[in-house]
Amino acid sequence: MSNNNSAAAVESHGFLHDQKKRRIVGDIAAHLFLAVLAVIWLVPIVWVFAESFNKNTAPYTSSFFPKEWTLENYKVLFTDRNVLNFPKMFTTTFIIACFTCVISVIFVLSVAYCMSRMRFRVRKTFMNVVLILGMFPSIMAVTAIYFILKAMGLADGNMTIVALILVYSAGTGAGFYVMKGYMDTIPTSLDEAALLDGCTRFQVFYKIIIPICKPMIVYQAIIGFLGPWLDFVMAKVICRTQSNYTVALGLWLMLQKEYIQNWYARFAAAAVVISIPIAILFILMQRFYQESMAGSVKG
Amino acid sequence: MFTKLSAIVFGLGNIVRKQYVKGIAMLALEVAFFVYMFTNGIGYLSKIPSLGENKGGKELVDGFWQYVEPDRSVVILLYGVCSIVICVAFVGLWVLSVRAAYKSQVQMQENGKAPSFMDDVHELLDAKAHLLLMFLPTLGIAVFTVLPLIFMISMAFTSYDHKNLILFDWVGLKNFATVFSNSGGTVNAGLFVRVLIWTLVWAFFATFLNFFLGMFVAMIINRKTTRGKGFWRACFSMSIAVPQFVSLLVMHTMLQPQGAVNRMLQTWGWITDPLPFFTNATWARVTVIVINLWVGIPYTIMQITGILQNIPADQYEAAKIDGANWWQIFTKITMPYIIFVLTPYLITTFTGNVNNFNVIYLLSAGDPTPLGDSAGKTDLLITWLYKLTVDKQDYNLGAVIGIMTFIVLAVVSLITYRNSGSYKNEEAFR
């Protein structure tokens, strides 16, 4: 490099200029690329939104976007409770999601902390067992879980809410791997300092590790909250009667042959209504997520 | 003396040494175990070898025909499995009780008194915090993951199919032979191999395309000079906010022969016939992979953004001072860090994709299905399993498929996981 020093010094002006040009071209390309991708990602969502105001309630209309617009779909969705009681499905799912979210965050944090920071006898065994269990297809156990819930008396009536909360949150402790990976990057010197200052292991957990892990907690909370809204198989096996249906089952039912002709636009309206709590929560969490990311462990 | 008696009366050694709470808890568990065994447990355990023989039906009692409930083999099998698990737990409790009694005896001799209840609680918050923190999660996993699995695995060795729904028997390895024979039928070796290969191809593309494209987009957003980072991220996260279930159903209707996409292309005059999204095998396979990208990339972006922001900035500065270009920085700092944190995530995503029920079932439902086969061209092992168990009620064949899925996954992921950096060297980035 030393031979070229003088040459580089002469050309430094042109070189800088060139670099600036390259950066501008790169910026334009990057923004264009992102814009194209954003359109691809947003089109189906915009379409659902538009479809929810469609006056023509049948599927497979001739145009991509509706021709006549109306608010009727939303009104009917919440007032017509005879065929499918959507408001009830919504509250049921919301309750389940809240409980699952809290329980899963607690479970994942505790297990990840133990795996990352404590050293005890069955630690590696536990990790391997969980890894192996995760490889069994979950659909395989669905029928068995239904029988177990039946034996516990949770399979009928309003107890299905409790049953679903149990089913969605009980096994979440097994999903500790990402959280553990994150905790592994937190310097142990923090723990050691706290232990020297007389903290117990438990205090280290909730006074030091949890605040640092906020971003991952946010991630985990999103996952936990979304679970019940998205799950279809488990809910279908456990909720045998329509009165206990969750939102996912209700939406699926709206697209079945008996309903689709009248319910297609209402399906879109319901999809919009469901996405709202999730979207609000998501925006709140993302702000929080970025803030805590910037302020985790410094230096 | 009391220590030895603790082998029979649990917790006695602890009660005598004034550890009342601990001792009484153990005693209560022992009593509960025996009550359960004598009321239900023994009955079910004794029926396990035969899985029930009473066919039920009408029976003449005192001159009247009475309906007699048949033995339900499923119930017997389930409670039998539960009883076995409870017995194993009881043995564990026995070991625990003797050990606790011995420990308190030793401590009595050394310190003059055994640790009080408060001491135990304090220890649970400190050196033994893992016992406290792990208890409920482990219990949850045991009851809702391990127990159902043992139950379903045992089904693979029975004749529980659509012909024997109430009463069935142990048949040994016969179901495995059915799956791996070429004797025709709706389930055979050729079909199994075809589904298996497609499952692996799907999981590979779904995992690695998602990961690399997601990482690419995340890094473009994360460039220093990219404007409106929050806006771009919000655009992509919109699709997470819409439940996956909904977007998949919407995609499914949009891609139908008379759906919105084909309509649009036809009105623009780009195509004359509808594109065969779910009717041609190759089209269907590519379609599900591409749509899975739409579903999965936002999650990858979220994950990787978090990790990118957590990479210590001093490493980048040091690299720049040493004259590294962006490619060197990427391959020597960013990639190793991301791989280190995300290897477990990649493995779980791979297994998750092998078991990705929603995308396939809601999008293509396994179609196109050749006539006479029980699995379609885009069916994964998992959706095949679902079709066999829920639609056709052939639980035994479904269980065999489940076990085979497990074996495939176990082999793939244990090898990769054991060779990964985050397993071998957990402290690398501290």
Image (cartoon, rainbow, N blue to C red):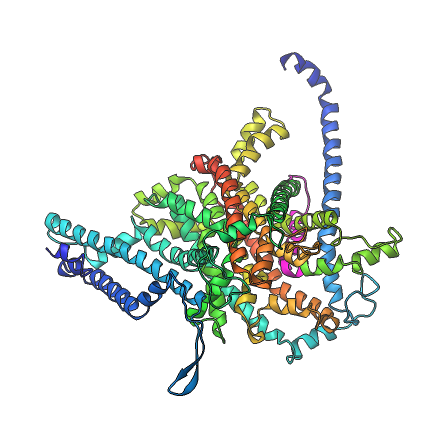
> Along the horizontal axis of the image, is B298 left or right of B29?
right
Q: Give the range drawn in magenta.
A: B223-247
The reply to whether residue B319 is in sight is yes
Q: Is residue B144 above or below residue B317?
A: below
- Asked if residue A260 lies in the magenta stretch, the reply is no
The reply to whether residue A212 is in sight is no
Q: Which residue is drawn at 71% across and 58% down?
A: B252
Nearer to the camera, A113 or A61:
A61
Q: Quadrant of residue B387?
A: bottom right
Q: Label the magenta part by its dominant secondary structure.
A: helix
> Along the horizontal axis of the image, is B244 left or right of B110?
right
- Asked if residue B244 lies in the magenta stretch, the reply is yes
Q: Residue at x 60, y 53 (%)?
A: B187
Nearer to the camera, A192 or B195:
B195
> Along the horizontal axis of the image, is A113 left or right of B259?
left
> Along the horizontal axis of the image, is A185 left or right of A262?
left
Q: Residue A207: image x %, image y %?
A: 39, 51
Q: Residue B23: image x %, image y %?
A: 20, 61
Report the label total: 0
Q: In this view, does B23 lie above or below A86?
A: above
Q: Is residue B352 above or below residue B40?
A: above
Q: In which quarter of the image is the C terminus of chain B?
A: top left
Q: Which residue is drawn at 26% across and 54% down?
A: B122
Nearer to the camera, A85 or B340:
A85
